[in-house]
Amino acid sequence: MEKRTIVAMPGDGIGKAVLEECIRVLDAAGFQANYVNGDIGWEFWCKEGNPLPQRTIDLITEHKIALFGAITSKPKDEAFNELAPELREKNLVYASPIVSLRQFFGLDICMRPCRSFIGNPLNFIRRAADGGIEEPKIDVVIFRQNTEGLYGGVEWSNPPKQVYDALMTHPKFKQNFGMHPVEEISVSTRIFSKKYTGRILRASFEHARKFGYKSVTVCEKPNVIRETSGMMYKMAQQIQKNEYPEIQLWNTNIDAQMMWLTKNPEDYGVIVAGNMFGDIASDGFAGLIGGLGFAASAQYNPETGVAVFEPTHGSAPKYADYEVSIVNPIAMIDSAIMMLEFIGEKEIAAKIRTAVAEVVSEGKVRTYDMMKMTGRADVVTKGAASTRQMADAIIEKLK
Ligand code: NAI
Ligand code: MG
């Protein structure tokens, strides 16, 4: 079998620990790959004034597939203060390398699966009608448009005259905001394009078809946000009718979806939304399946095939310097499983998924989060597994 090259970007803090363990698991499962290290994160901001060096962009351009741990971001002032002295005169501005990656490679599809593992003590439970306890099996995949909408970055405080004048041509703006002085107005836009709305919708329907989900739910707010949410829902209706008639199209409002989250999460399959509502919905569902230790994600560009796989969690700086890493590597490992599926290594993906599921359901090896402990360096002396021990347990199941 030909060896793949994977760009491995550990980033900062616990990103390093979880990625290292993840690669051990991939090796043990028989995935044939060379890993080339991609520099990213705070360290490179401080040393070089750029948290996403061009050499890393070049590596991803060449190899297309990347695994990513997590990075640290800090507020403007701290970013400046930690910059190497010789770089301080250069007017450098810190920009999140994740956002830069997304923009540079046009990673417009973000996919976040939320599937409960049987036996995970962090699984959501609820009261049944007869007074007993129910533990619904959740298997939801959220498709979030990753480049447009409210996170598109088109925003102003004290907007320039042309923008203000254009806004004043809208009767609602004039009526509801026209009385405020322009310098007291902030505007963040929510722009959707047909091209990228169509892409996220098709990606979600395609996924439903490929993996046998019966429904795709558009989770927006078309009754109020008529233009953007309305456009997405209308396009979804057409795409469903013309291209995916066997899949049901459902429509929920983001606010109602959050209420239903705990009522009937097992009813949902694929959920698709714009940038911000997708972010909200995916965090909501992730909370039902164990939270940050279990929340995986993929971001990709369906045209170029460039794809970055990463856990949803950040660099958890407070745990970064522990001699023994205590964090849960499963979110990272699940992200790698998504990578394997993406590149067509379905058997190895299934093998690792089964191994993780066995370890979780056996319940003998659990990281501190799964034991509902407060994260501290001494949790490993109190029965919690370390990051490495969790990976070892998964590797043991692969044998
Ligand atoms: P975080 O996700 O790093 O940590 C929040 C808390 O979640 C941790 O203190 C820990 O209790 C728990 N946690 C996170 N990952 C875990 C794991 N694998 N296993 C067990 N518990 C886990 O978020 P926080 O503290 O808001 O941000 C820390 C830094 O990370 C910041 O600099 C932030 O900008 C950055 N960040 C980076 C992200 C990324 O690289 N994609 C995403 C979110 C935050
Ligand atoms: Mg989020």
Image (cartoon, helix red, strand yellow):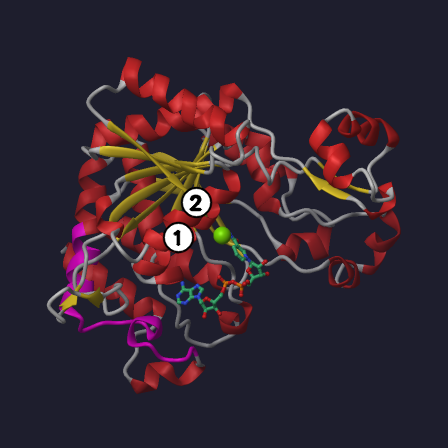
Q: Say whether residue 305 is visible.
A: no
- Side of 290 relative to 55 (left or right): left
Residue at image position (74%, 35%) is 175
The relative height of residue 285 versus residue 67 in the rendered view (above or below) is below
State which quadrant residue 154 falls in. Answer: top right
Left or right of 63, for residue 47: right
Secondary structure at badge 2 equals: helix
Please provide percent x and percent y for residue 367: 31, 72
Query: Callout 1: helix, strand or loop?
Result: helix
Residue that label 1 marks: 258
Task: Please indicate, yes or no, whether residue 124 appears anywhere in the rendered image.
Answer: yes
Q: Amino acid at mark 2?
A: Ile
Q: Is residue 356 magenta?
A: yes
List x then y, in percent, for residue 187.
Answer: 72, 40
Label 2 with label 1: CB-CB less than 8 Å: yes
Q: Is residue 227 above or below residue 297?
A: above
User: Residue placed at 59% from the left, 42% from the top?
Assistant: 99
* Magenta stretch bounds: 354-375
Alpha carbon separation for disc pair 2 and 1? 6 Å
Residue 191 appears left or right of 207: right
Q: How many marks?
A: 2
Query: Which mark is drawn over residue 254?
Result: 2
> As shown in the figure, which amino acid type bears the numbered disc 1?
Met
Q: In which image quadrant can residue 242 be found?
A: top left
